[in-house]
Amino acid sequence: MKKALATILALAMVFALAACGGGGGTTEPAPAATTPAATTPAATTPAASGPKTYKVGVAIYQFDDNFMTLYRNELLSYFESLNNDTVKYDVTIVDGKNDMAEQNNQIDNFITQGMDAIILNLVQTSSADAAIDKIVAANIPLILINREPLGDNGDESYKGILDNAKVCYVGADARQSGTYQGEIIRDLANKGDINGDGKVSYIMIEGDPENVDAQYRTEFSVKALTDAGITVECLDDQIGNWAQAKGQEICANDLAKYGDAVEVVFCNNDAMALGAATAITAAGRTVGQDIYLVGVDALEECQQMVKDGTMTGTVLNDHIGQSHTAVDVTVKALNGENIQNYYWVDYVKVTG
Ligand code: GAL
């Protein structure tokens, strides 16, 4: 059914493009059929000179996100570095403002604007199928980034779409980042058990719960401890939606409520860890002495904090590797080369 709809849509697009004169750079209206003036200049096509231009649409889930800001800036500058006399990438980047309806409109606009490729950082991975269907139907190569649409529920229709030769996902395996966070605590001399009561008591500050990054980091950070035979106690697990202010608020509340019982603060990302660090200092606690704090992303501030000892550790979420891979794959697809379904970039543990 979906396939039939996709075919109809694809055909509709072909006809629509044909009606618009092929969608290339020439927007000259066709001369009216009834007035074939003999004086009409025969050649209207300009000489083939200047670089070949590809239009690339990039939809980011939200500009207001520390990590995705680094990512999109690197993506843009890497595209720019590839421009030369023969090829030019005309990149349009839009802010989904964390609103799926807004992002759907942006995708529709990209399709009508005749983008040659689309790079998509979904607002809601649960809406992946609808968004992907539209882009596939328009026969536009699609490079999904940062938010892997396939959750634990194993969405088969998404898998089917990924089989499409022009769709792929570029990202990092969030399980690895969670495991690294847990290992950073496991490898401490006291294995995270500061008060020596035989268990590691922690609070978990989660990102957007719909996001596999949040789900896997939450699960695998703790699993790394239990796999090492360490007993754990979860004092609290709250949603901070990747945001610094929420991280601070949640951590401050938990420190007020559980006091010295809190031994480890796990944050699904560094932005929330930055907030937690503020709360930890305000509560008179000292990282490395009476509490541990870990995040993910390795934001510059956090790398410095790890060096200074005000953060126990973080995990590099390689925005350079990921954005460059996304661009390289886009270029491959634009050149009509085969692309794989998945491209993975490794996380790296960062400790002092
Ligand atoms: C994660 C990153 C978070 C946030 C999120 C957005 O990979 O660690 O900081 O940017 O992506 O989807």
Image (cartoon, rainbow, N blue to C red):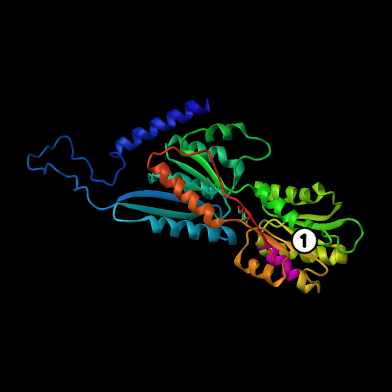
Which stretch is magenta?
A: 271-279
Q: Name above or below for residue 1 compared with residue 164.
A: above
Q: Quadrant of ligand 1?
A: bottom right
Residue 219 or 4: which is nearer the viewer? 219
User: Is residue 25 at all visible to an observer of this figure?
Assistant: yes
Amino acid on which disc 1 is placed: Val
Q: Which residue is mark 1?
A: 265
Where is residue 172 shown, x and y percent of the image?
A: 60, 49
Q: Is residue 277 magenta?
A: yes
Does residue 101 appear left or right of residue 203 in this picture?
Answer: left
Residue 164 coordinates in the image, percent (x, y): 49, 33
The single residue placed furthest to the right in the displayed view is: 197
Of residues 19 and 87, the one nearer the viewer is: 87
Taking the spot 55% from the left edge, 56% from the top edge, the residue there is 319
Q: Residue drawn at (36%, 33%), measured in percent from left and top?
A: 14
Q: Secondary structure at mark 1?
A: strand
Q: Is residue 268 left or right of residue 33?
A: right
Residue in front for this viewpoint, 29 or 344: 344
Q: Residue 305, how many percent across, how many down? A: 68, 70
On the image, which quarter does residue 352 sit in? bottom right
Identify the residue at horizontal 82%, vertical 48% (top origin).
226
Residue at the left extreme? 38
Q: Nearer the viewer, residue 97 or 319?
A: 319
> Could you tell me residue 167's position as x and y percent?
49, 39
Magenta stretch encompasses residue 62: no
Respond yes or no on whether mark 1 lies under 8 Å from ligand 1.
no
Q: Is residue 39 above or below residue 98?
A: above
Q: Does residue 65 show up?
A: no
Prevailing SS of the magenta stretch: helix
